[in-house]
Amino acid sequence: MSGILSGGWNFVVAAYALTAFILGGYAIHVVREIRR
Amino acid sequence: MFERMKRKTIAVPLALIAIAALFLIAGSFYGLAVAPAEVHMGDVQRIMYVHVPTAWTSMLVLTWAFICAFTFLFTGKWKWDSRLEAAVQMSIILSFLLCMQGSIWAKPTWGVWWDWDPRLTTMAVLLMAFAGISALRHFVEDPLKRATWSAVATVIGYVDVPIVYFSVKWWNSLHQQQSTVSTISRDFLIPLFINFAGMLLLVSAIMTIRTRTAARRLEDEIVPPSLLVQEAIA
């Protein structure tokens, strides 16, 4: 850990997890939609 | 005269999604584990390796939506309406994601989840505008009216895009101004560009598939039933 801000890994993990969830979820939805 | 569109497979876009996932995994690994922590902001700055590529990609997708809308209005070709539908939906996803990532970034750096700062406010307006266009497409049943009205609304809504971009220069904003490549360390640029390449590939592949879904629905709406019967007999 470095920098003026202490910690911050929880926010970093949240941002990456949210990005993966939204983009991954939408990609799965679009693929399922065309295969229906 | 309507022509039955060819039912293309989605093998190529699926392969692109797989390649994009590899890029994103590599870029995220570099950003999280290899790149050093930034001197002033510490580890929180690593959020930038997903936030900035999302911002760049969203600006490109919004511009693509504008191009699709403008081209439909001038040519009247339905393929541009299908492309517009995919672009509008992707714009909403990316704008929402951008606001959420920004909010996660704002809490540890600014001390608040949200602020009615010019950049954030104009971005929220853009998200609402495109959500409205999507709602309009959902509720209007007539294909021609739906295509024309949503194309006009997209052209009007796009006016907010340059305002979002220049908001940090025009007004006193909490949001930092855009950095340039020359002012960023190579260690920070590598994950930024790998993730941008991955996100651009992913979004292009998703929009390609979504455009085909929109084209199929449109085809079912506008192809005369007699033509469908003839094709079924043949």
Image: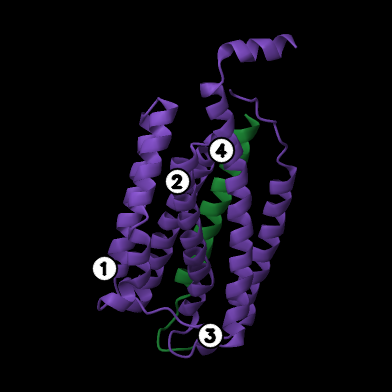
Chain colours: A green, B purple
Residue corresponding to mark 2: B69
Question: In the picture shown, does residue B45 fall above or below B202?
Answer: below
Residues flagged by tags 4 and 3 on a common chain = yes
Which quadrant: the N terminus of chain B?
top right
Q: Which numbered dot is residue B79?
A: 4
Label whose residue precedes the other's in the sequence (4 or 1): 4
Label whose residue precedes the other's in the sequence (4 or 3): 3
Residue corresponding to mark 1: B115
Q: Amino acid at mark 2?
A: Ala
Q: CA distance from mark 4 to mark 2?
A: 11 Å
Pinpoint the chain carrying mark 1: B
Q: CA distance from mark 1 to mark 3?
A: 26 Å
- Is residue B113 in sight in this rendering? no
Label whose residue precedes the other's in the sequence (2 or 1): 2
Q: Amino acid at mark 4?
A: Lys
Q: Amino acid at mark 3?
A: Ala
